[in-house]
Image (cartoon, rainbow, N blue to C red):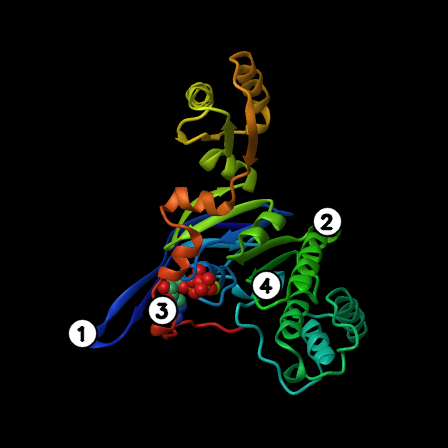
Amino acid sequence: MIHARGLVQTFQTGKGKEKKEVHAVNGVDLDVEEGEVVGFLGPNGAGKTTTLRMLTTLLKPTAGTATVAGYDVATQPEKVRRSIGYCSQVGSTFSGAYAGDEVADHGMLYGMSKKDAVAKGQELFERLDLGGMWRRMPKNMSGGQKRRLDIAMALIHSPGLVFLDEPTTGLDPQARINLWQHIGDLRQKQGSTVFLTTHYLDEADALADRIIIIDKGDIVASDTADNLKAAVAGDLVSLEVAGAEQAAIARDKLASISGQVEVEGLMVRGRVTRAGTAVPGLLRDLESSGVSLESIEVARPTLDDVFLELTGRSLRDAEAATEDPAAVELDHEGAHR
Ligand SMILES: Nc1ncnc2c1ncn2[C@@H]1O[C@H](COP(=O)(O)OP(=O)(O)OP(=O)(O)O)[C@@H](O)[C@H]1O
Ligand SMILES: [Mg+2]
């Protein structure tokens, strides 16, 4: 569905001596198969939106190539746009019309009959908890309602491939979960392919078949959440023992299945790949060596642990540390929605 090779986006900012290049995306390769839900994860400024804008033909790549839904983004942008749905990070600009009419008109723009567009629009309003909002102007809707309206716009023509840029930012917890269900349905009931960006780790975890992590314009990982966690971090096994002697034995035993083991008083900790299968043997081993445990805890790694190991920074720190993106406000895009 999406195949990109060496996608690059370099922005020129400032003038004269202030002139500077921003390397937003540094050569990204992507392959997304039909029916996949892919979570594109990275801190602020990592290059998520820029990549998405190149794939949706809103921004011309500085270098590299991409086909989306079988069409080339550079030479067949119209065909690409016809085949996809897109919900931008900032949302749509609406005219002064009723919300329902905006959505139905959008469907007709894609060649739907008025009857079909209205029926599909009403179904989407129901599903996105916008029931009763058809004859409301978007400017009189709350932020979260407008966000859901953006999503209805992206889905009205039942696209086989949907790009969602941070779809749940600004939604309350209930609306987020509701939208997750809706995105899950898109794939299950409609067979749609979904490419969504997020910096919510739980969202990527809950929704995506596969997670692609981007940092500073480079892809640093691409795999299922489970594999990423197992390969990079491993589960954290914490053993609490009754005495110092037992701690030494427990350390040796844990070291046989863990790369690095730490002892802190009576606590012995180590990361273990797929602890679910390794821990029962460890427990038997400890028991036969006379170690009695006060407690044991197995914590699954989080995607934040994965990010930390890959980049040396926590996703949250990385977000805090990025330069102010608003400082470089410049547009050299040649396209439109
Ligand atoms: N039009 C532009 N002109 C100059 N620099 C830009 C432009 N658009 C984006 N950038 C820069 O490119 C980098 C990547 O931005 P991008 O919007 O792709 O990040 P993002 O991963 O979507 O971040 P966020 O999570 O904040 O949405 C940032 O450093 C940003 O400041
Ligand atoms: Mg963005």
Mark 3 touching mark 4, by CB under 8 A? no
Q: Amino acid at mark 1?
A: Lys
Q: Amino acid at mark 3?
A: Asp
Task: Label 2: state its secondary structure.
Answer: helix
Residue 214: mark: none
Q: Which residue is mark 3?
A: 324
Q: Earlier in the sequence, mark 1 or mark 2?
A: 1
The correct choice, above or below, for 215 with respect to 111 in the image is: above
Nearer the viewer's eye, disc 4 or disc 2? 4
Q: Quadrant of the C terminus?
A: bottom right
- State the CA–CA distance, disc 1 to disc 2: 54 Å
Q: Is mark 3 within 8 Å of ligand 1?
A: no
Mark 3 touching mark 2, by CB under 8 A? no
329 relative position to 55: left or right: left
Residue 188: mark: 2
Look at 45% across and 29% down and name the residue there: 266
Look at 73% across and 66% down and name the residue there: 128
The correct choice, above or below, for 136 with respect to 164 in the image is: below
Task: Label 1: state its secondary structure.
Answer: helix
Q: Is mark 4 within 8 Å of ligand 2?
A: no
Front-most of residues 88 and 320: 320
Residue 167: mark: 4
Q: Is mark 1 within 8 Å of ligand 1?
A: no
Q: Which residue is mark 1?
A: 17
Label 3, residues with CA under 10 Å away: few <14, some 14-19, many ≥20: few
Nearer the viewer's eye, disc 3 or disc 4? 3
Task: Label 4: state its secondary structure.
Answer: loop
Front-most of residues 31 and 142: 142
